[in-house]
Image (tube, helix red, strand yellow):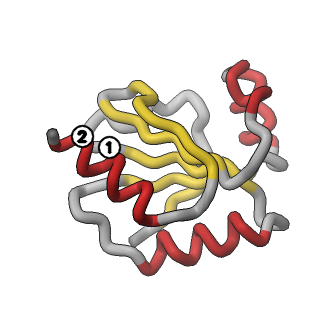
Amino acid sequence: MLLTPLDDIERSLGTERPALLVLGRPSCDDCVAWYAALSAWQPPRPLDIHTLDLTTPEGTAFKAANAWTEHIDFIPFNVLYVNGEPVEHWTGERLERLEQRLEALEG
């Protein structure tokens, strides 16, 4: 699976198909493990996966534009977007949890 860094924070995610945004940073061991797991994973349905390093200028701008990010205590933090709207969010790096979220979209 291809993970694409989010370089345009104005971009609407999940408009054509579901999109997962993973907020993290490269110095986070759990984030690096999650990125590796996602890279090797084949999703059960079409899905775009974007990463956003919170320590970059884009990450700082994203946090400023999205007040809800102040409440993130742990990373990686995942946000699933459908039709341009966040529909689920969770912390951690379990593929089973992501697959359950995607299955719930089908129902």
Q: Secondary structure at mark 1?
A: loop
Label ID, residue 84 = none
The percent position of residue 76, horizontal first and vertical second, equals 67, 54
Res. 105 mark: 2
Using the rendered view, name the quadrant where residue 59 is placed. Answer: top right
Residue 64 vertical placement versus 41 (above, below): above
* For residue 56, side relative to residue 19 (left or right): right
**Residue 37 coordinates in the image, percent (x, y):** 52, 75
Q: Nearer the viewer, residue 91 or 25?
A: 91
Residue drawn at x 59%, y 54% is 51
Question: Residue at (72%, 19%) from the top-left corner?
Answer: 67
Horizontally, is 34 left or right of 47 in the view?
right
Question: Can residue 52 be seen from the camera position used here?
Answer: no
Along the viewing direction, whichever of 57 and 65 lies nearer the viewer: 65
Label 1 sits on residue: 18
Q: Residues within 10 Å of mark 1 (few under 14, many from 20)?
A: many
Where in the figure is residue 21, as x and y percent of width and height?
Answer: 53, 46
